[in-house]
Every structure is written in structure tokens, then in C-alpha cells.
Amino acid sequence: MCAVFAFVCLAIPAFSCYGFAASIAIDPKSKVPGVVSPGNHQDCDNKTTAADDDTNKGGAQPTKQDADSGDDQSDNADQKDDADQNDSDHDRAAATTHQSKDDNGCSNDANVADDDSDDADKVDADGPTLESHFDYYTDSSRYVNITTTSLATAPYQGFMVSLRRDSLQARDPNGPQAMEITTLGFSRELTELWGIGGGFGTARGLQHGEFVGSLQSHFNYKGFSVTASVAREMLLESAQAVQAGIRQTDFGLNLSDELSEHVSADVEVHHRTYSDGNSSNQIEFSPDYTFALPLGKLALGYRFSYLAFARNPDSGYWAPQKALSHGLSATWSFDRTLYYARTELGLDYESVREIGNLSNGPATSGPGASAGVAFGIRLIKGTELETYWTGNGSPGWNSMNVGISLKYLF
């Protein structure tokens, strides 16, 4: 599997420029949960960001992959770098994916969805920006993650560079843990077709410190896009995982195509290796059909996800032998000059086979549901204030997270 990704990376000329993008995987199921990396922010609807993700379970989620994942990716510096126990852990993994994506906010998607804002009042999106973000996540397994983020981006010599600092406070039944991640990221469009992005940084916990980084390259042609990425990141799904210092290396490949004016499709593949000797493979497929309405845009889609781990080391992250989910999603969004909003709803059916001490049995299955809403205002030119809420649930388990972000564009 690694050889396939190596071939893809070598086939992309943009990879001739080396660099790293800091990636942080905080939740088991998503790409970039609580603490999102500088190259991995994702708006509510964007595909999960590829280079920075942890193990994704592929359950019901209001957006997809992500995030992240995760929010900040609306920033140019946050180029798509893209770096997810028992049944409750399995679903928490799914919810975390939302956390990573939803904590990233929906402003970018809303803006794209319905461009009703007055162009004369818009601020240059390629200029310097400052952003502060707060996210709170909790679930029925008594997992709590509190993440605060400070991000500054600015253009420099044809690059968009970013300096980001994430602080995570995690608590689970084993007690509290903390992690701070500082990353320096970059992105650049080399031609009209090719672009690169990445970053590097450090992640420091109470007992240890680690290097994190990622590199990604993308190719776009007439609505067709290919993104290849490699990321080394911390697995921050729970306080136990933080304490153990589990690291993962993520090889990601994302294909997306605008098949017509209304139809688009995304395919995402990940192979991950872990510092505890584990490995996983993940495939996601998500076609959408978008309706242009007078009051906004409505997107109806299908979501398919498959995730499999080599083994379950019981190291504080959800590692099912096999997890399969598929279902439907609906997203409605609009954008006005002074405000924007986005709502999402997902219904799916999940089938999971687990192994190890964290499982409740050899196999479980059942329906799942997720929902999310985000609202932002622009009372002052160049300033965006956004708040959001997401919820996720399946039989015997539920989760929710809320957040707020303030962004200033110079």
C-alpha cells in the first residue's frame, strides 16, 4: 500500500518541492479533530482534509470526511493537506470526525454556496488574517476535549504562510491530559493547475514532545482535482492516547470531480501506520447533487465509508477490525452580506466488527444520525464571528460539540 502512495507522490511534479505541514489528529474518527493543524482545516462540507486525520470510523456525519478539519481551512494558509473500546468508542470516533470538521466552521462553504454578498464590501481573501477559535466536545462515554486555537496567516514571496498554536485539554475516565502544538505552514499555487502546501512544528505534552509535519500537492483541471499527501501527526482521540504519545503516519489520496453543474463526487483513500505497531486502511466515497434555490443552496448526497485496522492494541483509540457505514445527507446553506448560515442532517446505517478488550461483542450494527448548524455574522468589514453546534448519535451512545471563532481579514 505504501508503495502505491509513493508512486502517486512521485508522479506529481509539484512534489519536487519538499516541505512539511503540521498535522494533528485529535479524534479517532476524523481527520482533524479538536486541535486542527495549519494545513488541515476544513469547512463543514468540504471533504475531509486529507493529510491530517486520525482514524476515521466513517459513521454518520453532517459533513464529509474534515473536521476538520476541520473551520480554519477556509484560510488560504490552511491548504488541503490534507493528517478516527467499546461500541461507544466506536461512535465517538465518528463524532470526532465531526468535531474536527465542524469545529472548523462553515463560513467557507456558506460563502461558496450562495454568493449574494456585495463584492464591494469584501476584503481580499489573500491578505493577512488573524483568527481565534474555541471548541468544546463531550460524549456519553465521558470524553471531554477543549481546544483553543490562534492562527495568523500572511502572504510572503508568493507563498501564503501561517503560524498556528493549538492547545488541547482532554479528559476521560483515566484522568486529564494536555497537549500544545505549534506549527509553521505554507501553501502556494505554482501554476494554474499545480499547487503545494505543507508545514512543520512540534507537539508537546506533559511527558513528551514530538515532531509533526506534512506535505501535500494538488492538481486541478476543469473541475477535476487530485490531492496526494503525507503527514506525521499525534493521535489525540482521548486523554489515554495523549498520555501514551501515539503517533501516526498518514498517506492520503483524494480525487474529486465536478461531473456537471449540479453533480460532484469525491473519493478519499488513507493508509495509516501507528507507533504502537498498528495500521489501518480507509476508503470514503461521497457523491452530491446540488440544487440552486432562491434562498440558498440545497445539497443532497450519499455517504459511504469503510475502515479496517490490523489489530486493536487498546491504546486509547477506537480500532475496529472492520467498520462499514452508508447513508444519506442533506445540507442547506446561504450567504448574505452581513450574515451566513449552514445546516446539515445525516442518516446512515453502520455495521462494525470489533476485536480486543474494548469491544462489546464480535459485531454490532444499527442506524445512526447526525446534525449540525452554524451561523456567522459580519457586523464590521473584514470581521467574521461564527458559532456552531453539532450532534451525533447511535444506539447507546451520543456526542455533541459547540464552538465559536473570531476571524479578522486585513
Image: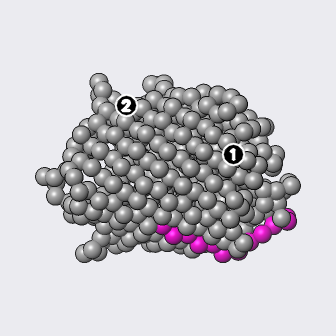
Residue 211 vs 408, above or below: the answer is above
| 239 relative to 358, above or below | above
- Quadrant assignment for the N terminus: top right
> Was residue 396 drawn as part of the magenta stretch in this picture?
no
Find out whether residue 363 is within the magenta segment.
Answer: yes
Q: Is residue 109 above or below residue 171?
A: below
Question: Of discs 1 and 2, which sits in the foreground?
Answer: 1
Do we see residue 113 in this rendering? Answer: no
Q: Which residues are magenta?
A: 361-372
Q: Nearer the viewer, residue 243 or 355?
A: 243
Residue appearing at x 30%, y 52% in the figure = 384
Q: Are marks 1 and 2 in contact (CB under 8 Å)?
A: no
Looking at the picture, tell me which residue is in the foreground, 63 or 305. Answer: 63
Q: How many numbered discs?
A: 2
Quarter occupied by residue 130: top left
Magenta: main secondary structure equals strand
Circle 1 residue: 176
Q: Report the amino acid beneath label 2.
A: Val
**Residue 250 in picture, x, y percent from top left:** 62, 40
The x and y percentages for residue 401 are 54, 60
Give above or below for 10 relative to 133: above
Residue at mark 2: 161
Q: Which picture quadrant has residue 191?
A: top left
Residue at image x 51%, y 70%? 371
Q: Closer to the N terminus: mark 1 or mark 2?
A: 2
Q: Residue at x 56, y 50 (%)?
A: 146
